[in-house]
Amino acid sequence: MDRSPATDYAADAQAAMIAAPTSKSGAWLHRFANPGRFQRLVQPLIPWIGWAALIVCSVGLVWGFAFAPADWQQGIASRIMYVHVPAAWVAMNGYAALAICSLLSIVWRHPLADIAAKEMGPVGAGFTGLCLITGSLWGKPEWGTYWVWDARLTSVLILFFLYLGHMALIRAFDNPQHGYRAAAILGLVGAINLPIIVFSVYWWNSLHQGNSITLTGPSKIYVTMLYPLLISTLGFYLAFIAMSLARISSGIMENRARALLLARAERSGS
Amino acid sequence: MVKNTLPYVVGSYGAALAIIGILSLTTFFRYRAARRRLAAVEPRGRGESGSAAS
């Protein structure tokens, strides 16, 4: 059957609205990740998460910049930590979320997972860029240079390029579904870079310091520095979540508006 | 070694404000535009969330 480009696009957009379960194991995912249910659940939350992000980020950054003590070795340059470390964590965990969406897209072909991965990409790239910029600004006074081809720095730069590649690949095809499929494969394969980033400081001789905070052991940072760092981190995570949810919601609304307009144009044309 | 590190600290916080601020503003304006556009084309009684699939 011949299909016009408008019909193709309407079908794609319609597919993004309808999620039919493809397997028993994936049925619960489709139930909770249905775009309509997602919108009803998320839209009232977005302003609350956004305001919480603004308040928590402000408290964390002002505390870190003005009130946290300077490090005895690094002096006030250590205050860059309250921006750099949260940005790095959000950049890595944002890519982990993107990789999970890519997996859901490949296994269950869920349209909401495609939209989520697409919309998280630019936000994650922004935080990765912030991590690289603040890392360079920290490196100059501490190492005497803005950049070295160190394992940690290079692997984070690769993470930044993976984000950019994902964004470019989604938009590289005339058929959006082809772009989503190719980007999902890149998103999943690129996840191999995450453990490389984490363990790079142990696997190779690195200028970058080791991890000061771990999930399993005690923190090496004193509480007067740890509290503003954790608050700043919470604020950055909330900002990432708020922006990602708002962008996903926008993407769903744009798809639906486009599908409605195309359907209307086809009805009036026939 | 650099002695005055304050410009680097200020630059880092400035970059944070700039990047997060630009991302937030573009997200906000896009979200608002998408809501308005959908509200303009959505048939009456369907709400503006893009929830229905039929």
Image: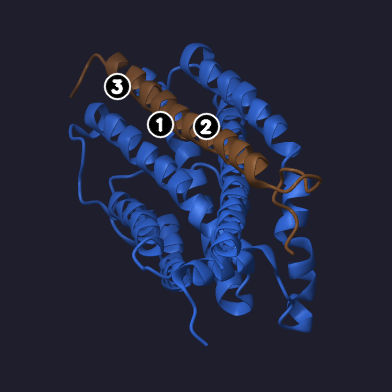
Chain colours: A blue, B brown
Q: Position of residue A239 (x, y in %)?
A: 57, 35
Quote the CA–CA distance across marks 3 and 1. Answer: 16 Å
Question: In the structure shown, which secondary structural element does the residue marked by tag 3 occupy?
Answer: helix
- Name above or below for residue B40 compared with residue A106: above
Residue B8 marker: 3
Question: In the structure shown, which secondary structural element does the residue marked by tag 1 occupy?
Answer: helix
State which mark lies toward you, 1 or 2. 2
Sequence-first tag of 3 and 1:
3
Q: Which residue is farthest bottom?
A: A1
Residue nearest the viewer, comparing A99 with A70: A99
Is there one chain holding both mark 3 and mark 1? Answer: yes
Subunit under mark 1: B
Residue B29 marker: 2
Q: Where is residue A52 in the image (x, y as percent from the top left)?
A: 68, 27
Q: Horizontal placement of A136 versus A89: left or right? A: left
Count neighbours of disc 2 (C-alpha within 10 A) and say few if under 14, some if 14 to 19, many if 20 or more: few
Type of amino acid under label 1: Ile
The mark total stands at 3
Residue A211 appears anywhere in the view: no
Q: Where is residue B28 in the image (x, y as percent from the top left)?
A: 55, 32
Type of amino acid under label 2: Phe
Sequence-first tag of 2 and 3:
3
Residue at x-position 46% and y-position 39%: A87
Quadrant of the image containing the C terminus of chain A: bottom right
Q: Mark 1 points at which residue?
A: B19
